[in-house]
Amino acid sequence: MPDPKVSVIISTYNRPQYLHESIESILNQTMSDWELIILNDGGVDVRSVVEKFADPRINYVHDTVNRGAAVRRNQGIELAKGEYVCYLDDDDTFYPNHFEALSKALDDNPEAGLAYSDLYAASSVSDNKTGRRHILDKQMMVSRDFNREFMFHYNHVLHVSLMHRRSAALRVGGFANDVKVLIEWSLTRRLAFVYDFVHVEVPTGEYHLAIFKSDRISVRERRNKASYQHNLRKIRCNLPDEPWPKVERIDLLYLVDRWGPKLNQHLREIIDNFDHPMRLKLIGNGAGLSLEQAWDSLKELKELKNIEIIRIPQKIPPIIAFRKAARQSTAKFLFLVTPALQAVKAPRRLFASVDLFKEKPDLQSLRWGVEGEEPDKTQFECLIYRDYFLTHTKPGGRRVVNVQGVTVAPPKGFKFDIMYGEYQRLAKNKEWDKAETILDSILAERKGFPHIQYLINDLENVCLQNKSYERLEKESLALIERGYKPDNYMRLARLYRRQGRWADVLDVGAKAMESLGLKFEDFEADCFPFKLGMELHSFTLFMDMGEASLELKDFGGAARYFHLASKLKSDSHKPFLGFAKAYFESGHLDRAEGALAKMPQPAGRNDPEAHRILAAICRKRKNLPLAFECLKKAIELAPNDENNIEPFYFTGAGLGRWTDLVEPLKNFVLHNENHAGAQARLASVQFSLHNDFLARQAAEKALELEPTNPVAKSILERIKKAAKNELEKAFAQGGSEELPELNPELLPGLLDSSPIVW
């Protein structure tokens, strides 16, 4: 039987309830040329789960000892017969296109060692009674074009998303067995020394996140910050065997004046802040301690695989000590360092410096413009070609090394992160036009950048603020066409709700539910309802669908969607507001009032919409004074909420409470001067208070914003008519035969005795 093309490895430990789903996702692949190796890492024996599939392509290996996922994946690589290898956790799933999409990418790019796709993070809750997992949200949390420099800083290739050549993993030593979290980074980081990666921009699977307590090792390990940070240092300091065709070799030569805690803390800062791979050669220049004692003084750092100690018993001049270490180096560059190095202040300097050396072939060495590393404080803290250093510091010569002081530009590999930081600043300052411009610049980039499927959340933000609705709809639909469905269907529902496209909200909402795999009956499971500090996207979806049903007069449908929302956040008052509106619209005032009374507090009484609904109930019951008090409370809670304006005005006008209307309306237009409707209502109130000049100002502003505004036009007409009547009255009393040459619009008007209500 010929060897399969793809070997997929599952390491499982005490999660038999989800393993069946993971295996099934492999059997559903469009490509059949594969083998599955399931390695039981000392947990409950899952042979019965595996044997139910009765597929000869599945190989089950049981072990009673828990050795960790890294060990098991390395074991799987050794057992694998396929040319390509990929991984699946026992609680995650592949989409049917996973093998086909990634193997084709490797076939088409023979120089690449690894291909990776996009994954959805699927948030779920589990029913303890049935063991079933209910997925409530799917979001694209990681998606970035391959960027080697960024890969050395942070992993952007998740193990469920990748497929690598088996030979490539063997070339760099596989996974690091001593790493407990970010295990995939221990492999992908070292692969980046030797190979390019290919990003396949299509979703091919999902990894699962428990909304509540997670049993993932990665989650547990992050709770101990010191242990987690040391775990990261192990990954950063584990370098593959040379040669490194994709990475410039740098050796950091550190001149140690004293072993101990101060040195150790400085070394931690260097390792944590300098992402560029380096070997660290610690030069004990007359610093005391034997070699064994020096290693012991490093504490946990002695476990790191890129540290070497060069002991010099008697102190010698620093330049000679550096030369001694440099002769033992085979690196292209030397990073000459003393305790004066300010690692935290310029963490990207090595990447940027290597860029500069490539741009300027005549450049031999450089020093950074960093506070605390000035030449008068230290002659070192520089990056220099090894051969140049050894040639120009020979004993007996002048020993002159020219070090060029520079302020290095940001490294090319972090261009996105710098641009995105500027976008975030503009968005925070609500400079939305500028924010959209820089986001467009980001989206125009391709190499090494995240693309639209990752940045769509930011684009949604600026499009909603700038009312670029057509663009947002177009981008969302294009992503859906490419397979990015659940999050973009929910995004469209939010957009259509904003536009009042109620039938469309229900249409895309149903598609969002289908893409999440949600059915109405699912919410009868014992895991519902629950309380959660945040609002899930599915919660927002159900609230939007409830509002759409209300607008379409489907009160039963509205109640059903609000009921689903209440299952996802039982401590939210918003579904109760929905119930109240549904009851109100269907004529059940007592039930509407009862729904308001059941709202969780204090959020309920602090929501202006609750007071607006209560005011509407009072108006139906002909209790205008109480309705007006409710609306005054709504204004107090949200003075800039435009939804307050119309009911507040109508109710106050019906009571003749013109004086009480003035200040809230003036305050609103002060902060929302481009709101034509509020300007018109303020004009009406001022006219009713005999303030014709102020009424004319507000009415003219309203017409400037909305030339057809009927309220503002009527106010101006009444002001003119009143002025004319006053003029005619004055003429009649004075007996003059001719009207004076006056502009009647400048004269004060007469008030009609009836209230102005439209």
Image: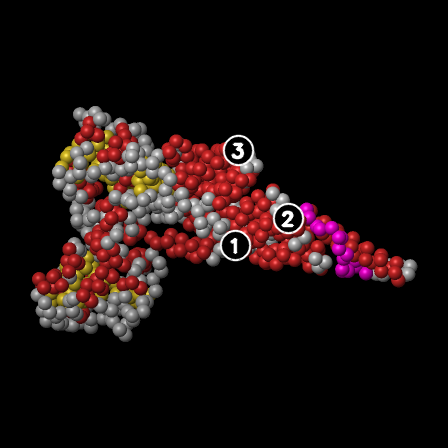
Residue at 44% x, 42% y is 540
Q: Amino acid at mark 1?
A: Leu
Q: CA distance from mark 2 to mark 1?
A: 19 Å
Q: Relative to 579, is 666 on the left or the right? A: right
Query: Which comes sooner in the sequence, label 3 or label 1?
Result: 3
* Nearer to us in this view, 446 or 586: 586
Amino acid carrying mark 2 in the image: Phe
Cα distance in 3D space between marks 3 and 2: 27 Å
Q: Position of residue 234 (x, y in %)?
A: 20, 53
Q: Where 264 sits versus 465, above or below?
A: below
> Disc 3 residue type?
Asp
Residue at which label 1 appears: 637
Q: How is the image coloured?
A: secondary structure
Q: Residues within 10 Å of mark 1 (few under 14, many from 20)?
A: some
Kindly identify which residue carries mark 3: 554
- Majority secondary structure in the magenta region: loop
Comes first in the chain, label 2 or label 1:
1
Residue 650's tag is: 2
Q: Quick check: marks 2 and 1 in contact, CB under 8 Å?
A: no
Q: Is residue 4 visible?
A: no
Label 1: which secondary element: helix
Q: Could you tell me which residue is drawn at 25 percent across and 47 percent down?
A: 218
Label 3, label 1: how many angstroms apart (C-alpha)? 30 Å
What span is in magenta?
Answer: 742-758
Q: Residue at x 61, y 58 (%)?
A: 663
**Residue at the bottom extreme?**
376
Which SS class for mark 2?
Answer: helix
Q: Position of residue 149 (x, y in %)?
A: 30, 52
Left or right: 736 in relation to 564 = right
Crowd band around label 3 with a 10 angstrom C-alpha radius: few (<14), some (14–19), many (20+): some
Residue 294 at what x, y percent from top left? 12, 64
- The x and y percentages for residue 155 are 29, 48
